[in-house]
Amino acid sequence: MKTPRLAVAVALIGALFATTALTACGKSANAGGAQTKQLRYQGSVGQVTPPELAEDLGYLGDVKLKWIGNTISGPQDIQAATTGDIDFGGAFNGAIVKLKASKAPITAVLGYYGSDKDSYIGFFVPENSPIRTARDLIGKKIGVNTLGAHSEAITKTYLKRNGLTPAEIKQVELVVVPPVNTEQSLRQGQIDVAALGGALRDKALEHGGIRALYTDFELLGPFTGGSYVLRDDFRKQNPDTVRTFVTGTAKAIEWSRTQPRETVIARFRTILTKRARNEDDSQLKFWKSYGVAGKGGTITDTDFSTWIDWLDSIGELKNGKLKPADLYTNEYNELASGGAQ
């Protein structure tokens, strides 16, 4: 059964697309003319995304990025890409499945974040919390950054695998908390469990007094969790630009894997300084990896089939079950075929 919040989200996405689809076409691409060399995007405060790293390393050639602000969540980012307010956006792969199911004309072209032994999203409780099992979460509040995305999917997968019924799962409340406030909310007792990832997770662990109840890595192993999407009309009108962007970003992901961690972090600090957005760079010291599973962000069927099956099982795919091939392409990623080094 579709939960009310997810039903509303899907309805809003569909309405948003329907009212903007006609005007979105051509906002960036020049139909019949030269391919655009500027890509509009949203960033993240205090973080360096793979495309930003790629541009700084010179991997994007004559393609330039234009920052228009910071995103508040993955679903918001890919909705903005769908409506043409930006040229590419990134989100949890399950959110991409839902948006595609609403008939949005988008395609995933590159994985950009994931989970491994060093980079994962954990769900933490205070050290002295009585919560020890999935069943203990009934009637409790879990703080997440947004609904209908990575943390919700992982949590409901965890609950289902541990024997909770659909009715019991509904009694576990997911509460939206800004990521920078999540640790504090947990320590003040405003929430019972905190979803924490990246530097915010490591800072919280450094402060002590918390323990992980479950993590996405423990649940699923290493996996690519999110991908960048582009509108289909944009891809068709700007194929060379898209190839440069995707392959350059793929090379940046691999650069981050092969360089010493200290070298990558130093580069991140330089990028934050140069862009002069008055950001706190203290969390960069906790960076370990982007967590992407495939070489250069290469996407596989499994990256989407896991979430297609989950969404289908809870009745979210009303327009028919999608196939992974409906959702992504590696055609622009030269690292996927070994064509770029």
Image (spheres, helix red, strand yellow):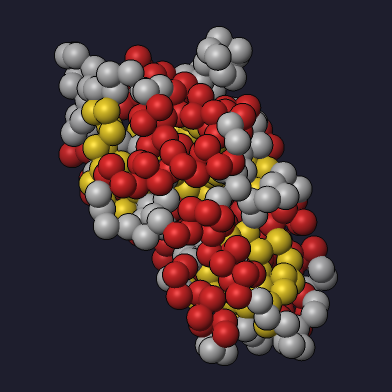
Look at 42% across and 35% down and name the residue there: 53
Q: Is residue 312 left or right of residue 85?
A: right
Q: Name the quadrant containing residue 299.
A: top right
Q: Is residue 164 left or right of residue 254?
A: right
Quadrant housing the C terminus: top right
Q: Nearer the viewer, residue 20 or 262?
A: 262
Q: Position of residue 207 (x, y in %)?
A: 60, 75
Point out residue 173 in the picture as x, y percentages from the top left corner: 58, 79
Q: Name the residue: 55% across, 50% down.
A: 287
Identify whether 287 is placed above or below 65: below
Q: Is residue 303 above or below residue 325?
A: below
Q: Quadrant of the N terminus?
A: bottom right
Residue at the far top in the pictured view: 339
Q: Is residue 297 visible?
A: no
Q: Identify the residue at horizontal 80%, vertical 77% (top origin).
A: 133
Picture coordinates of residue 196, whole percent (x, y):
58, 66
Q: Nearer the viewer, residue 280 or 54?
A: 280
When the figure is inspected, residue 171 is found, relative to residue 277, above or below; the finding is below
Residue 56, horizontal then vertical, whole percent: 36, 31
| Quadrant of res 26 | top left
Q: Quadrant of residue 216?
A: bottom right
Q: 272 or 142, which is in the foreground?
A: 272
- In the rendered structure, the answer to whether residue 35 lies left or right of residue 240 reads left
Residue visible at 44% across and 23% down? 248
